[in-house]
């Protein structure tokens, strides 16, 4: 008998192991549409693997995203939540299986009886072993409704995991673009400082030769000092952007970071369709919408479970026990064995209106889930529309800033030539320098905004992936 109990304990210990999944909840998790970037990137199937140490040199946007997905705690939290809901699905499925419990006890008792000056003591050892089985055989679909609710909640968790991955993706991309813009701003600030230095040196030389006035020298010197201040601030902004990107990918903020500043390569926009087509695609693919629909289905299943709680249930109960007592006196030892098998019909009659209010709560939860779904549909549609319109505007701005920068550079060349020849004024030169600096800054901002808006549109469609950060 002791060997049987030891074997049962071993089985229970095995069932408690984390890798043991007899009801297939982890298989349900794996069978659902994979989260985030996986449908679009085969290299991430099975979850994003952490890359090795970051090599020196420039880092690409795809590398930044990979490292952010690995290091950001939000992705780990989202995955853990999916595993949690998968475990709850297993709990719901376990209601179809019988429960078996064992009771083992051993007690020692003693009794002393004194009568007429004589005493008698009786000692006894009692051992009890009992095995109980309970099995719900039929409940009019209550368990199935609970399983359906857990299954839809798991789908919502996976969709939310997808949304979390996209959020991390966008945050990493924005940090990359911020550093890209900061690098461009510093390059422009250094170029403006160089140009102002040349202008100041030319004005100083003219003043020393007696062909230029002191006012021109002081004006160019002031502009040069302002250019130095702008360059110092650009260096500080670059350091902040480097630290933010480094932390985003799990590195120390003091690690030097540099990204590719080649503005000639722009990602494709082949995924941009008509507004109607993109709205329809977003309604199908957006992870937040998938999560909201799954929550609505889960709430509907909870209504079914609450309504079926009014119905009876049929269960099987069985037990087998053995009780033994050993005495140290003339009393014979006791060995008692019990067996019991019963069918039980449980008919709910009155529970203080608990089931009634549970049903009302489930119905209210369903209405809230429906309203939430409608709210998400409206928000996603607005996100697609705004991102599409922003991309159209940024695309036009991109072309305009390219022309503007070309015109400003030519204007500066003319102004510099006129100033050196003595036919141009200092104000004309300073205005040309300012216009060139502004045009270069607008070009940098337009490039960064265009890239960020393109990714935001892809995310609003629920189609973000590594394809969206690779150059064509």
Image: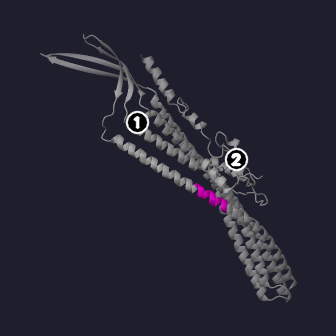
Helix, strand or loop status at disc 2: loop
Label 2: how many residues lie within 10 Å, few (<14), some (14-19) or many (20+)?
few
The prevailing secondary structure element of the residues shown in magenta is helix
Residue in view at x 45 percent, y 17 percent: 3
Task: Decide: is 204 above or below 339.
Answer: below
Task: Decide: is 266 above or below 187.
Answer: above
Residue 379: x and y, percent? 56, 56
Using residue 243 as the reference point, say whether residue 84 is left or right of it: left
Residue in view at x 70 percent, y 42 percent: 43
Residue 225: x and y, percent? 72, 77
- How was the colour assigned to the protein in this rendering? one colour
Residue closer to the observer: 311 or 39:
311
Magenta stretch, residue numbers? 380-389
Q: Which residue is mark 1?
A: 308
Residue in view at x 30 percent, y 40 percent: 352
Q: Which residue is mark 2?
A: 53
Please say whether residue 305 is visible from this viewpoint: yes
| Quadrant the N terminus occupies | top left
Please say whether residue 247 is visible from this viewpoint: no
Helix, strand or loop status at disc 1: helix
For residue 157, what is the image quadrant?
top right
Task: Decide: is 376 above or below 238.
Answer: above
Q: Outermost residue, right direction? A: 421
Q: Tell which circle, 2 or 1, labels the residue nearer the N-terminal end.
A: 2
Residue 216: x and y, percent? 78, 86
387 within the magenta span: yes
Residue closer to the observer: 357 or 74:
357
Q: Outermost residue, left direction? A: 116
Using residue 155 as the reference point, say whether residue 121 is left or right of it: left
């Amino acid at each position: 008998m002791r060997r049987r109990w030891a074997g049962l304990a071993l089985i229970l210990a095995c069932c408690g192991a984390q890798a043991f999944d007899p009801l297939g909840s982890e298989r349900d998790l794996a069978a659902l549409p994979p989260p985030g970037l996986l449908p679009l990137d085969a290299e991430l199937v099975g979850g994003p693997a952490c890359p090795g140490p970051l090599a020196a040199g420039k880092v690409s946007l795809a590398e930044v995203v990979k490292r952010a997905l690995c290091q950001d705690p939000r992705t780990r939290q989202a995955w853990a939540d999916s595993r949690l809901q998968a475990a709850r699905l297993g709990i719901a499925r376990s209601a179809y299986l019988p429960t078996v419990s064992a009771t083992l006890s051993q007690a020692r008792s003693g009794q002393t009886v004194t009568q007429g000056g004589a005493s008698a003591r009786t000692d006894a050892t009692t051992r009890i072993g009992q095995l109980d089985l309970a099995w719900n055989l039929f409940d009019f679909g209550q368990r199935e409704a609970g399983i359906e609710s857990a299954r839809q909640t798991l789908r919502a968790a996976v969709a939310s995991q997808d949304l979390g991955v996209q959020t991390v993706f966008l945050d990493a991309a924005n940090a990359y673009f911020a550093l890209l813009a900061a690098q461009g701003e510093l390059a422009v600030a250094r170029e403006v400082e160089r140009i102002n230095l040349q202008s100041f040196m030319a004005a100083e030389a003219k003043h020393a030769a007696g062909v230029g006035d002191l006012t021109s020298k002081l004006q160019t010197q002031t502009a040069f000092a302002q250019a130095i201040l702008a360059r110092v601030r650009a260096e500080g902004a670059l350091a902040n952007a480097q630290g933010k990107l480094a932390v985003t990918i799990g590195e120390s903020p003091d690690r030097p970071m540099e990204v590719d500043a080649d503005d000639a390569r722009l990602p494709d926009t082949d995924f941009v369709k008509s507004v109607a087509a993109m709205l329809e695609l977003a309604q199908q693919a957006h992870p937040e919408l998938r999560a909201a629909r799954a929550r609505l289905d889960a709430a509907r299943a909870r209504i079914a479970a609450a309504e079926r709680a009014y119905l009876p249930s049929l269960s099987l109960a069985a037990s087998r026990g053995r009780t033994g007592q050993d005495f140290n006196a003339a009393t014979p030892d006791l060995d008692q064995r019990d067996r019991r098998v019963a069918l039980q019909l449980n008919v709910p009659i009155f529970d203080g209106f608990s089931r009634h209010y549970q049903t009302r709560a489930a119905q209210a939860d369903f209405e809230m889930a429906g309203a939430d779904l409608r709210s998400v549909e409206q928000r996603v549609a607005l996100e697609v529309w705004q991102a599409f319109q922003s991309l159209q505007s940024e695309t036009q701005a991109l072309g305009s800033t390219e022309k503007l920068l070309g015109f400003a550079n030519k204007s500066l060349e003319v102004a510099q030539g006129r100033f050196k020849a003595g036919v141009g004024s200092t104000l004309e030169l300073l205005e040309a320098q300012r216009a060139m600096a502004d045009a270069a800054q607008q070009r940098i901002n337009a490039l960064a905004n265009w890239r960020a808006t393109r990714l935001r549109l892809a995310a609003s469609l629920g189609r973000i992936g590594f394809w969206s950060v690779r150059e064509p």
